[in-house]
Image (cartoon, grey):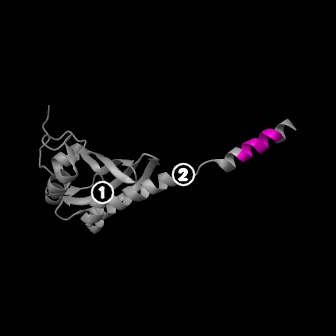
């Protein structure tokens, strides 16, 4: 009898659990992936802007002087960062999502890029972390191999120590 009572209690609790967390995860992944596709595949800047929270920020987390660690607002993202990416990758880039990790507050997209930079083949690996608030993207941080960025996109040379 004791087992049956516990089993029924567990079954009832399981049936009453809120699936909104799973739903939020799925919605957050969809929002982040659509943002990346609108930005890099479709070039749909109105859709990109519509996905941004009014307090949106973007930060490239690399250690490249003059580029890394700068927090962009929505306006400086469009006026400074997006044009810079266009200059460095004039042929564009194909980003493929390897997998996504999400909760109800954000997403991490793990992606592989395929492109040619201004200094040769540029195939980097990325993690983009998205914080999401009220169904909009509050912030994005981009992580990748800044050594590859420095040598393939900024034409920096490696120096022996």
Residue 9 among magenta residues: yes
Residue 133 among magenta residues: no
Q: Alpha-carbon neighbours of circle 1 within 10 Å: few (<14), some, or many (≥20)?
A: some
Q: Position of residue 94 (x, y in %)?
A: 29, 62
Residue 113's tag is: 1
Q: Quadrant of residue 89?
A: bottom left
Q: Position of residue 112 (x, y in %)?
A: 33, 55
- Nearest to N terminus: mark 2 or mark 1: 2
Instruction: Give the SS element for disc 2.
Output: helix
Q: Quadrant of residue 65?
A: top left
The answer, for residue 29, to whether it is visible in the render is: yes
| Location of mark 2 (residue) | 20
Residue at image location 83% in from the left, 38% down from the top: 3
Q: Position of residue 132 (x, y in %)?
A: 38, 49
> What range is drawn magenta here?
5-12
Instruction: Give the SS element for disc 1.
Output: strand
- In the rendered view of the protein, which quadrant contains the N terminus? top right
Q: Position of residue 26 (x, y in %)?
A: 48, 55
Q: Nearer the viewer, residue 116 or 130?
A: 130
Above or below, comparing residue 35 to residue 64 in the picture:
below
- In the rendered view of the protein, which quadrant contains the C terminus? top left
The answer, for residue 97, to whether it is visible in the render is: no
């Amino acid at each position: 009898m004791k087992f049956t009572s516990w089993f029924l209690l567990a079954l009832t609790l399981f049936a009453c659990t809120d699936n909104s967390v799973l739903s939020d995860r799925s919605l957050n992944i969809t929002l982040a992936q659509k943002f990346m596709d609108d930005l890099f595949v479709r070039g749909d800047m109105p859709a990109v802007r519509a996905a941004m929270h009014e307090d949106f920020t973007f930060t490239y987390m690399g250690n490249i002087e003059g580029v890394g660690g700068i927090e962009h607002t929505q306006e400086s993202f469009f006026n400074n960062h997006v044009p810079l990416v266009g200059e460095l990758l004039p042929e564009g880039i194909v980003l493929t999502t390897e997998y996504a990790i999400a909760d109800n507050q954000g997403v991490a997209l793990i992606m592989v890029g395929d492109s040619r930079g201004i200094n040769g083949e540029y195939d980097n690996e990325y993690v983009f972390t998205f914080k999401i608030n009220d169904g909009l993207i509050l912030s994005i941080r981009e992580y990748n191999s800044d050594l590859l960025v420095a040598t393939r996109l900024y034409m920096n040379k490696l120096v022996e120590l």
